[in-house]
Image (cartoon, helix red, strand yellow):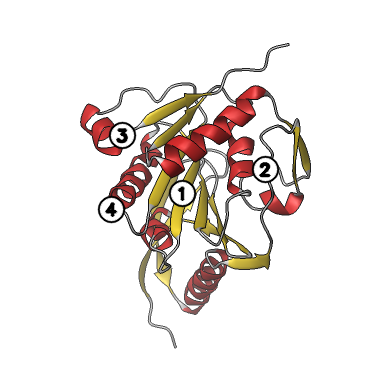
Amino acid sequence: MTEETDVKLRCGVYGEGSVFSVKIKRNAIVAELQETIAANKKQRLAWRSTRWGSHAYDPNSQYFLLEKEDVDESGLPPVCMMLYCRPTFHRQFEFLRDKVLNEGHLGWILGPPGTGKSITAMAFASTLDRSEWIVTWIHVGKFMDWQCVRLIGDERKTRFLEISDVDEVLMVDDKRHHVVLVDGWTAANEFMELTRKCVRWFLHSNGVKQRRLAFVCSVATRGKFQEDMEILTRAREFRVCSWTL
């Protein structure tokens, strides 16, 4: 028989974004509910793995195909997409390749919503040589679960992510280089701890096992930033403009 004790239950009203606590008596029914919630959470946060290879990139091509499997559970629309490669598409590839991967700058990709920043970043991720690079994609949102994609070898792994899991996810025990792309970033308070964790991880890079980091922002400007952080991270910005005819 389960001993009855007080349990603090955190409750939320769907759609309102507010959370409050209530106290209830812990009995057999509540204990079973707690076990079910814990099991569901563990399953939700576990990695799901599929076999999936990389794509080739042609800097002269006008089109780039992203399959549905490339974007599943990434926070992007889960559909097959034929992308038109306007000049900005190729310039964003160059920025990620040259400034972020090769030169080791912290990258900030900025621009209004709907300009293709995230899709282009995912396309870039899908072309990296996975014998040399591990890719970790983290998609964040204020009112939705964070989603994580990892490209490692011939595997594509996905899971949901909580802030308490970030350090563990970033610390991959592997000899390959590692690039992290944080998608959907804004200067909202909800993302400050994530930013600190990612930047701390990035700054512990070394010449043998390189760590690379870029934020794909859902806004046109980062807002106020710290000058010392800019210097330490050697930050560079890339701006994506709206479509014009």
Which residue does the numbered mark 3 point to in the structure image?
234
Residue 119 image offset from top left, x and y in percent: 64, 37
Distance from Cα at disc 3 to Cα at disc 2: 27 Å
The answer to whether residue 58 shows anywhere in this view is: yes
Q: Locate residue 234 relative to residue 102 in the image: left or right.
A: left
In the foreground, 57 or 70: 57
Which amino acid type corresponds to the residue marked 1 in the rendered image? Val
Q: Are marks 1 and 3 in contact (CB under 8 Å)?
A: no
Which residue does the numbered mark 1 point to in the structure image?
180
Q: How crowded is mark 2: few (under 14 residues within 10 Å), some or many (20 or more)?
A: some
Which residue does the numbered mark 4 point to in the structure image?
204
Which amino acid type corresponds to the residue marked 2 in the rendered image? Tyr
Q: Earlier in the sequence, mark 1 or mark 4?
A: 1
Q: Which residue is drawn at 57% across and 35% down?
A: 93
Which residue does the numbered mark 2 point to in the structure image?
57
Q: Locate residue 186 relative to residue 198 in the image: left or right.
A: right
